[in-house]
Amino acid sequence: MSSGIFGIGLSALQAAQRGLLVTGHNISNTATPGYTRQQVIQSTSDARATGSGFIGQGVQVDTVKRAYNQFLSKQVAQAGTESSQLETYFSQMKQIDSLLADSIGGSGLSPALQDFFGSLQEMATNPAEVASRQSMLSNAEVLVRQFHSMNSQLDEIQEGVNRQIENSTSLINTLGARIAKLNETIGMAESSANGQPANDLRDQRDELVAQLNDEVRATVVVQSDGGYSVFLGGGQPLVMGSQAFQLTARPSAMDADRLEIARVMGGGSIPLKEANLDGGKLGGLLQFRNEIIDTVRNGLGRVASGLAGTFNEQHRLGQDAQGNLGGDFFTTPDPVVAASTENTGSAVIEAEIVSYRDLDVSDYRLSFDGANYTLKPIRNGVEGNTQTFATFPQTVDGVRLNLASGTVAAGDEFLIRPTAKGAGQLAVAVQDTGKIAAAAPIRTSAPAINAGTGRISAGTVNAPPPTDPNLQQAVTLTFTSATTFDVSGTGTGNPTSVPFTAGGPITFNGWTVQITGTPKPGDTFSIGPNTDGVADNRNALLLGALQSSNTLAAGGASYQGAYGQLVSLMGNKTRELEVTADAQAALFTQTRALQQSEAGVNLDEEAANLLRYQQAYQAASKVIQTANQMFDALLEITR
């Protein structure tokens, strides 16, 4: 009997002791990241059958178990990776918001645009003054520098994103390798312990998975042996048992300045779809780059290219101080066409802007399947409607595409970016104030002896910019009746009895005039070269009118309007992200708190457990003490 009592007391003593050890372990790891509260699982030892019934044999400790809830842990991982993605996106977005907010301040793009056109209006008031012309050139240089400055800041932001992508990829590789190593260590530890769970090692592995989800969304599949297989978006394996796969951040085949994530395989690598790499910091960086950096760069480029192109078109319709037809005022950046480094053909694709009015903020991916070309616009990181064609040239959104040379092979791809370099490569082409085409190259007149009431307009030069050498040749209109006139002059063909409608356009040699009123037969009107146009401001007024003209976005926006749309879009996006990121962070905090209420260490509860196990230990000691006294009593009887 004493042996049974001793055994029962000893089992109780050992159970209480292990309870104290586990409780102390919980308390000491209260602040340990990823630690899960542990608890002793005990059961009744098998009872011994006797003639008086089954007599209990005490207690046994079955295992030490983690208070782990897989469902809550998955919820925390999901909420955490989405919160990390939004927070990363928002933190990057604040840089763009600050960039554009600064650009509408005293030294930003909007003031530079206003100052440039303000100096243009001043020159139109005093076209013969060199100081006014120089002021216009100086403000044009300031405007160009502002475009360059904003483009340089975008370059810096993109370089920062590239560095963060590289760091995140490296950390993902490190975490994957550590998880794989822990899979191996846990398997060996639990095998040597007859299948008992290695709780602390499992906590470390779960903490690594949480850190991995902070970088990118990861899905964990628990294998039959308890090991973790970890998959990234799209089902790409990162960890399979004790094997870890590696990722790399490499320059894109379509754009060397753009990093893409690829899976390392053998001596090469295979790119992963960015759409599948969502969640976490990496997902936020990729989303920011695709949706924001490209949009802002293209938006700025459209304003810069549109300004340069439309301004040049009007400037070429004018005449400079030396009496020559106007040239380009700005250097207009060309579209960028990048051939994939994986192309097998020798084709060179050219892109040319033919309508600045129709320019979009999209990039375009051109691919060839061996028979047809497929063109997909990419805007805000999303591909648009596909356009298919078999031959060149093709025009899309004001950009004409052509096969310049070489042959295209099946599978070849090209990235076309019409406005990406617009802000960075804009320049002022005119350096001489005398080259500013403020005047119109033609002048109209009517002799005072005309008998009718006809009045001729100052006339305008027609677009596209004239190449007709007869533009500045004298032309005379002689009315033969109130409704017809004859034409004489080089390049006109000298037609007779040309129908006339008061106020209607009359066009010859690349110019257009209007005659109002009622001319009499014999009345003449002359259109000739502007031989003394230094003080003429007609083309300068037309250049100044471009400021408020809807020359961009298919005629839906002015320069300032198109830029304002970009600023508004980014401002609204920043505010949206701020609200969404705050809401997701609150959800993550709540989910984490719910999970910790079950898995975290509660010091009050552990203090109570200490007292409980201490009293149990003392009671077990009393059982052993009682058994000892009974044994001593038996010895006394036998003496």
Image (tube, grey):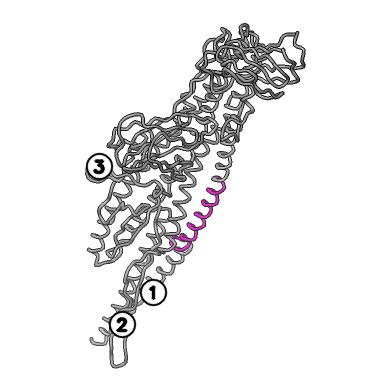
In terms of sequence position, does the residue under pointer 3 or pointer 2 come before the other? 3
x and y percent of residue 346 in the render?
A: 29, 32
Is residue 156 left or right of 444 when viewed as pictured?
left
Residue at 64% x, 14% y is 123
| Labels 3, 2: front one | 3
Q: Quadrant where the C terminus lies?
A: bottom left
Instruction: Decide: is 119 above or below 223.
Output: above
Secondary structure, magenta segment, majority class: helix
In terms of image quadrants, where is residue 286? top left
Distance Cα–Cα, label 2 vs label 1: 16 Å
Report the Cα–Cα distance between label 3 and label 1: 68 Å
Of callouts 3 and 1, the N-terminal one:
3
Say which amino acid is labelled 1. Answer: Ala
Left or right relative to 148: residue 623: left
Q: Which residue is mark 1?
A: 619
Considering the numbered disc 1 on the image, is that residue within a helix, a strand or a loop?
helix
Pointer 3 residue:
268
